[in-house]
Image (cartoon, helix red, strand yellow):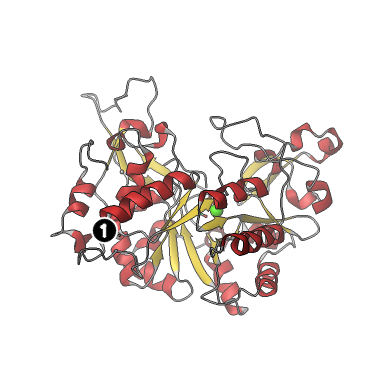
Amino acid sequence: MLKPAVAPSASFRLTPVALACCSALLLSACGGSNDGNSLSTLNGDAPLVVAHRGASGYLPEETLEAYSMAIDMGADVVEPDLISTKDGVLIARHDPNLAYSTDVANHPEFASRKKTTQVDGETQTGWFASDFTLAEIKTLGGISTDAERPQQYNGLYKVITFQELIDLVKAKSAATGRTIAVYPETKNPTYHRDLGLPLEDKLIDLINKAGWNSKTAPIFVQSFEPSSLKYMRSKGLNTKLIQLIDADDVNLKTGALTYAVPYDKPYDWAKAGDSRLFSAMVTPAGLAEIKTYADGIGPWKRYIITVKGTLDASGNLTDINGDGKINEADTVSQPATTLIADAHKAGLFVHPYTFRNEKRRLASDYKGDPQNEYLAFYRLGVDGVFSDFSDTALAARKAYLKEMGR
Ligand code: G3P
Ligand code: CA
């Protein structure tokens, strides 16, 4: 789900996290060792920068232009969400509801297809990809999904198929000599299966056709729904698999993660009557279970560093920056959890999401500098980050590697 974002430089106050992780004595407690320049990632490699929906901080997300920009910035990996068209083609879109990320509302020829329906138990009104052929969807343009980001490119760039992204990644890898990876997500897999448009077999076919069905291929396959990952593994998918772990929000008064439908649990668990929440996945038992079918976890970053606001004498949240709003800019980062160390102990890599540059999404201890947030997570040993701003993630990684003597 769309979640707002958050870490150190020489001029800012060190958080408990930064203090712990800057200390050689305590570094092993942060999930790694310090022998001078070894990194505390699972495999000792530098953390990956995953371009979340492409260079989505700058251009309409999940378009060829947004992915090209991210690759040109130097991103290691590009991330598409996959949904299905009416004619069963996998396209790169975050939501089945096309109203959220395309200009479909401006197309009078499709006005009659507007409807109200349920997606993962949530009532939505709009235009749904399962009612449109690929040819029809190709007449639409992508739009920004964040009103505070550039709007001048709205409608200019087309919706693309996953195959078109594979082709782009292969062409860019050949042209640059870099190995650029893709990170497809099966989006709303139970919803699509219920519609008669299951995603998994088509995704496996495309991966086989790309010659990427192996653990070492430049591809990571992710999902919030365990059954989608387990199904693909059972059908012979051998790529790296990642279990995503969501929550609804943070209670800024306590720093505790909150669990409201439909972000409380994977939808396949909800349909099966499984009472567990996503939080069950970050326990040692939960991680051990994930390790039986996946290679890594993609947790919302608040599972690693949560944030907490400041309370006044009456127990109300304080607008510490005086901008008239209470948001993450009014919070302070809390000490890191043991999730990275726990996941690494279970043999799972950790790719938290989503890192964003907007000041309103940065805890106050980062002093408005998004690089500080990346630094905090890199120092803790994350194996990669999902970022809307790959250029910032890469600049922070360069600073981190320099700090580590690399
Ligand atoms: O897939 C990682 C991250 O993208 C999960 O959140 O909602 O942006 O797909 P979402
Ligand atoms: Ca995603």
In the image: residue 14, left or right of residue 321? left
Q: Locate residue 220, reporting x and y percent.
A: 53, 66
* Residue 178 visible in this rendered orientation of the protein: yes
Q: Which residue is mark 1?
A: 405
Residue 133 in view of the camera: no
Q: Is residue 168 above or below residue 117?
A: below
Residue lying at 67% horizontally and 67% vertically, measured from the top left: 203
Q: Does residue 320 sit above or below 69 in this rendering?
A: above
Residue 242 x/y as whole percent: 49, 65
Which residue corresponds to the image point at 66% horizontal and 34% vertical from the top-left? 153
| Residue drawn at (36%, 43%) of the image | 371
Q: Is residue 366 left or right of residue 234?
A: left
Badge 1 amino acid: Gly
Q: Nearer the viewer, residue 381 or 398?
A: 398
Quadrant (top left/top right/bottom left/bottom right) for the C terminus:
bottom left
In this view of the protein, which residue sits in the foreground, 75 or 355? 75
Percent across and percent down for residue 27 are 20, 60
Residue lying farthest to the right in this orientation: 109
Give percent across and percent down for residue 142.
69, 41
